[in-house]
Amino acid sequence: MARAALERVLDAERVDQVFHDNATHQYEYVLPFSGLLKLLGQVVLRKQPSVNAAYQAADEKLEASVTAVYRKLARTELPISEALVAHSFAEASATVRKLRASEPAWITGYTTRILDGNHPAATEHRIEELRHTWDAPLPGKALVVYRPELRLIEQVHLTDDGHAQERRLLDDVIATIKPRDLWVADRNFCTIGFLTAIHQRRGVFLIRQHGTLKGVLIGKRRRIGSDDTGDVYEQQLRISDDPEMPPVRRITVVLNEPTRDGETELHILSNVPMKDASARKLAALYRKRWTIKTVIADITRTLTGEIPSLGYPPAALLALCLSFVICP
């Protein structure tokens, strides 16, 4: 069943249509996008050690040279790679729902989306532009949106600047926010702009407070109870002078044991109404944020989504996205 679903997702006609719908400068000549993915997929699936090896072992002789293949990979437009993941999610999620295999919602009435950053490892010095530097460059960066109820990666947002801050891509994420979304993320994404945007789009958030976001505490901190990790407290926090942005819930977990960074308290910000989830439940749900890191770790162990020889960021990011498509 998994094989049949994957064959549908990577059907040549469908992925070529994804290319045509999203390409602005790149064009197909003798090698269609589906053919390019077929070669790259051999490497991602660890059937071949490199794109060149996959090219040499191809069942049918390709009209394009191996140089042309690498050139096409290097010029793959980022919106095409992003759209490939979105296409995969649309196809796979329909199958999951048809089979009634989805997990219960984290909070009834909300769609949970976990946000995290990811980037391929530093590349080798094989491309001409990198032969005169000692540094191993980072070929791009991705923000990954994971749907835990469906166990699928829904979106990726890419940049070809591997040294860019993850927050630089938040505007792209904001454009996708829908009402009744529950966005769960680490403190790297805790900005007033992002939290405000989620509220304005009638979504909710569960995001760890970043040290640079201070705000003004309101009232006294109330002890709510305890769980396996420590005592849970709640207090209101005003994070913005904008009257349309109400105070948020600041949930504090006083840990039984310090984190590996020596922290004894965790502060989590949320605007989920109290009637929908208690502070203890939200604290427990935040710990499940690691679901996305587990998924990405499984992909890394199972597939080769990070190909060191693909030094050009568009090629490396396409391989990463293809691993996200294949793994589910």
Image (spheres, rainbow, N blue to C red):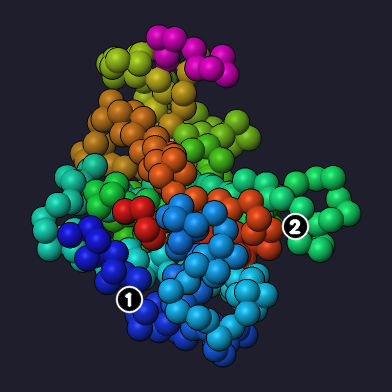
Residue at disc 1, secondary structure: loop
Image check: 161 left or right of 244? right
Q: In which quadrant will I find the N terminus?
A: bottom left
Q: Are marks 1 and 2 in contact (CB under 8 Å)?
A: no
Image x and y of residue 147, in percent: 32, 51
Quadrant in the picture for residue 315: bottom right
- Asked which quadrant contains residue 220, the reply is top left
Q: CA distance from mark 1 to mark 2?
A: 32 Å
Disc 2 on helix, strand or loop? Answer: loop
**Mark 2 nearby-residue class (10 Å; few <14, some 14–19, many ≥20):** few
Mark 1, Cα crowd under 10 Å, few <14 / some 14-19 / many 20+, is few
* Main secondary-structure element of the magenta-colored stretch: loop
Q: Which mark is residue 169?
A: none
Provide the residue span drawn in magenta.
254-263
- Residue 41, image x and y in percent? 45, 63
> Within the magenta stretch, is there residue 256?
yes
Residue placed under numbered mark 2 in the picture: 126
Task: Residue under label 1, please give it.
Answer: 11
Q: Amino acid at mark 1?
A: Asp
Q: Is residue 110 above or below residue 10?
A: above
Question: In the figure, 280 relative to 57: above or below?
Answer: above
The answer, for residue 217, to whether it is visible in the render is yes
Q: Nearer the viewer, residue 58 or 194?
A: 58
- Sequence-wise first label, 1 or 2: 1
Which residue is found at the position 44% from the left and 40% from the top?
Answer: 301
Q: Residue at x 28, y 16 (%)?
A: 227
Residue beneath the point at 24% across and 36% down = 277
